[in-house]
Amino acid sequence: MSDQLTEIAAHPVPPLVDGYPEIADHGLIGDGQTAALVGLDGTVRWLCLPRFDGAALFAALLDADRGGAWTLRPAGLRAVRQEYLPDTAVLRTELHAASGRLEIRDALLVGGDDPTDGPDGRPAGGPELGVAGGELARLVTVLDGEVDLAIELTGRGGLRACAETDEIRLDFPAGGSPPLRLTASRPIAGLDRLAGRIRLTAGERIGLVLRWADGPTRHRSADQVAAAIDRTAAGWRIWSREISFTGPHADLVRRSAITLKLCDDHDSGAVVAAPTSSLPERIGGERNWDYRFTWIRDAAYTVYALRRVGLASEAESFLSWILDACTRDGGPRVLYTVDGTRPAAERIDHELAGYRGSAPVRWGNAAADQVQHDVYGEILDCAWQWARAGGEIDDRRWGRLTSLGRSALAHWRTPGNGIWEIRRSGRLFTYSVAMCQVAADRMARMATATGRRGEVAQWRQAAADIREALLTEAWDERAGHFTEHLGVPGTLDASLLALPLRRLVEPTDPRMVATVEAVQRRLGAGGDLLYRYLPDESPDGLTGHEGAFLLCSFWWVDNLAGSGQLDRAHELFDQLCARVNHVGLLPEQIDPATGAFLGNFPQAFSHIGLISSAVNLARYGGRRS
């Protein structure tokens, strides 16, 4: 099959800032167990093994000197370009040197490692995205001229190389895992010392494979490496056929869906918030967090987004994982590892300097121990989606869901750390109260749908009582908008924009329209950007400020569309879509002053927002004018 690549121009090599590339200057590859970031210059600067939350083998984004990276660099590098093979997670990076031009194709292999075709004529393992190969394959091809290529590997905490008959064994002490294996399709001087050099001419190519799965690789020759990458691309294309969307910015919706799949643990169905840790929300600040886990809060939004672009299987897998994890040990946690367990305690890594000196680097996330009462609504909203799609809720599961609903009723007036996970004493956040109302409402809906009619009335009444309290106590009559906390006038946070999305209030309600306008005025960061809150007005226990939070802007789009302001909604959505990087990826936050990407990258929540807003705009229709 032809790759049908887009003809995009090469650009000069982007300059480093403080010794680091821009966060945006990377593409993501993955295999359903882990993911890697590949720079515009062909350098792999992020890879954790053997899964998303494993030890970082390559972490040069967090320390350019000591983090570790895999570099493929031609002498005299002048220009670069990078793109995905269409509808795949295979990256193609083109490097223009003074004397020639080369292409690198990078993939984390999926679908098994059998180099033969299957009985149906398709590449063996092609559609099996659930099978991670445990290998990073890199195919280098010289397109024209000749190139002197440097191949260097360094690892977080150091690598020890031992050359064997047909491979190089790498000991990675910091990883605590079995030895890695590096193979090349032809001899490369110095590669046994992890600093190889080779001259290649037009038409020549090299296959390189880094393997952490058990046993040796079966991809030895350049042809075999190329075939393995082709099988991986074929698998992604087959999977991508399930994506169904024809509305605004359909190309970015498809890329967002693939990006969410790259954040999906294929074995469990869990979706991590981002594949990275500690990329800063403000350069030089302390707001640096580990996002390589699954937040329950993300679940309902993720399931909604996946379902509406045709990915029902992924939605069902995630729903099943959520319900199992959250009802397993008596009570829900805020976040989990991909196998449904509690993350290790948060710790600070004093050896890594942080991206552009933004310390500290953190592994683990202390939010796992926070009190966040919105989780009850998130889980029960997921359970309702499960039931509505035909999922069975037997008496055992119903009992566990009932316990969650009762916890929401018991705690909805109890202060907590809230959706933004403040690191100071809890407050009675409006969003948390709203999600406790959602918990009661969804219990009533599920009781109706599953024939448990004797329980419907009590849940409906509880939902009505909480809703009435919220609409009364969160409304600031003097300011003319809803507030961040119940009973505390004045302050705003952007989670208020989610109230219509959770059916607490209609987007056309004058109170909600006024709240949206107040959020824009008070939290606006310029143009299409919003801060999620202002730390000076809503203290969070941390120093400094952060960037604009992209998901909040997508919520803004949804509110505008829901209130009939379609021209403004489409214009805002167009502006947000223009912020994707060269391969269609989005971060958590944007620096309003420069437009630079901030926070962990790519951020699942941002791509969920893009999909959801596109779906909503398609549902409401085109522009008025």
Image (spheres, helix red, strand yellow):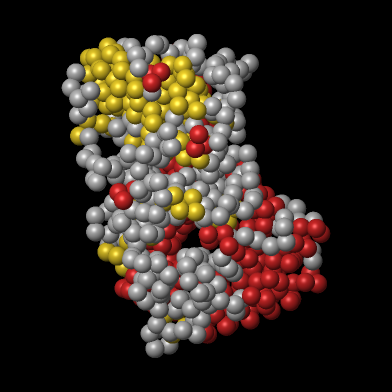
Residue 459, image x and y in percent? Answer: 71, 74
Q: Please count the marks in the image.
A: 0
Say which residue appears at 65% left-offset and 61% top-offset.
332
**In the picture, which quadrant includes the C terminus?**
bottom left
Look at the picture and state if 174 lies above or below 74. Answer: below
366 sits left or right of 70 in the view: right
Say which residue appears at 74% left-offset and 72% top-offset.
456
Is residue 150 at least partly visible in the picture?
yes
Q: Nearer the viewer, residue 136 or 512?
A: 136
Name the residue furthest bottom: 478
Residue 424, image x and y in percent? Answer: 48, 71
Name the residue furthest left: 98
57 sits left or right of 197 in the view: right
Q: Nearer the viewer, residue 212 or 447?
A: 212
Say which residue appears at 46% left-offset and 16% top-offset.
163
Residue 463, image x and y in percent? Answer: 64, 75
**In the picture, which quadrant includes the N terminus?**
top left
Say which residue appears at 41% left-offset and 73% top-offset.
539
Look at the picture and state if 108 lies above or below 183. Answer: below
Q: Within the image, what quadrant is residue 492 found in?
A: bottom left
Q: Within the image, what quadrant is residue 489 found in?
A: bottom left
Q: Within the image, what quadrant is residue 217 found in?
A: top right
Look at the picture and state if 213 lies above or below 476. Answer: above
Is residue 85 at least partly visible in the picture?
no
Residue 278, image x and y in percent? Answer: 42, 51
Q: Nearer the viewer, residue 300 or 184?
A: 184
208 sits left or right of 447 in the view: left
